[in-house]
Image (tube, rainbow, N blue to C red):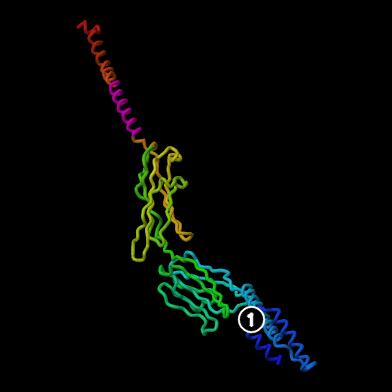
Amino acid sequence: MCGLEPYSQHQLAPHHQRRSSQDQHHQCHQQLEQQAPGKGKGCPHRQTGSGSSRTATHLQIWYILHVILVLIDISSSLTMTEVKIPNHIMRLKSATLGCRYALDGESLYSVKWYKDGHEIYRYVPRDKPPGQAFPLPGVNIDLRNSSDTQIILRRVTLQSSGLYRCEVSGEAPAFNTVSESETMTVVVTPNHGPKITGGQPRYQIGDTVRVNCTSSPSKPVCHLSWLINGEPVQKAHLRQYDKIVVNRDGLEMARLGLEFRVRPFHFKHGDMKLKCVAKISSLYLQSNEESVESDRQQRAPALESRETVAAKSSTIGAAGSRLPSHLVSLLPPMLLILLLRTWPWSRAS
């Protein structure tokens, strides 16, 4: 039978003889027409070729669907629009950490917050309640005012400083995840301004000025800078020192030295101003200034001593000039005596 023999041969024969396969297909059709004219059921060879074409069509369809899914995934990806974390905040203040995102057609699965790699907050819309906080030293989250877009840290301490990261994840099947992080530093400002030590009240041209500026304990340590008559000092004249840790809280003191030789231009109207500035970001700014006088204006004692010597010499000269005056004062009595002796009645007697 043509319906069986060619089929079995097609299964066993290799596909590299294309022409013989066409001949067998032609003979099969002739036999089917002879056996049942007008009622041929088709050659198995043609059925096998159509099956292969169906398989290829299915693969093409799956490929097209895959490309469409990839394009949909690219066009509707989850994105992070803003992460707002304060760089510096005063101790015992409340800090607001913001995290905004765009789903772009996706569904939100979760929003998570981390500090130094440890999870501190999780928001899952399907959970009841959706927000959940995890204990960590230095982290006190206000759950009532926290949500998927922000968390509130109450009364921050020095332990609250660290790297904070917001992570947003979409729902299945993609489970896209985006995240961003920022560092927050808790600040303790100094109790008073910087202190200048080592200076002299007066300097002469050519003298060497050696002074130090020390900040009060703070966290982080203050940034110090020197100014002479309002102008920044050259780095060559600065003397750097290591910071000093003063207590268990880790508060630190900074010290910066200044050394330079006095030149005539340092004095403005006989006065030189040395100023030290202590700064912590935009949260703290204090300064201390000392006014130094030129030694030229302080030579009055020397001038006074010269004037005193001149006064003494004039006194001695005056004393010498007074001696003849005393003798002159004795002349009238002497002249009177001489007159009395030479008077005529003295001769008559």
Furthest residue to the right? 38
Residues rendered magenta in the picture: 302-321
Mark 1: few, some, or many residues within 10 Å (few <14, many ≥20)?
few
Quadrant in which residue 189 is drawn:
bottom left
The percent position of residue 272, horizontal first and vertical second, equals 42, 43
Q: Please tell me whether residue 305 belongs to the stretch shown in magenta.
A: yes
Furthest residue to the left? 349
Q: Amino acid type of disc 1? A: Pro
> What residue did someone put label 1 on?
14
Residue 46 shown left or right of residue 117 in the figure: right
Q: Is residue 310 above or below residue 24?
A: above
The percent position of residue 227, horizontal first and vertical second, equals 44, 48
Q: Please tell me whether residue 326 belongs to the stretch shown in magenta.
A: no
Image quadrant occupied by the C terminus = top left
Quadrant in which residue 78 is drawn:
bottom right
**What kind of element bears circle 1?**
loop
Q: Is residue 50 above or below residue 104?
A: below
Q: Taking the image as drawn, is residue 333 in sight? A: yes
Task: Tally the numbered discs.
Answer: 1
The percent position of residue 80, horizontal first and vertical second, equals 57, 70
Principal SS element in the magenta part? helix
Q: Nearer the viewer, residue 92 or 340?
A: 92
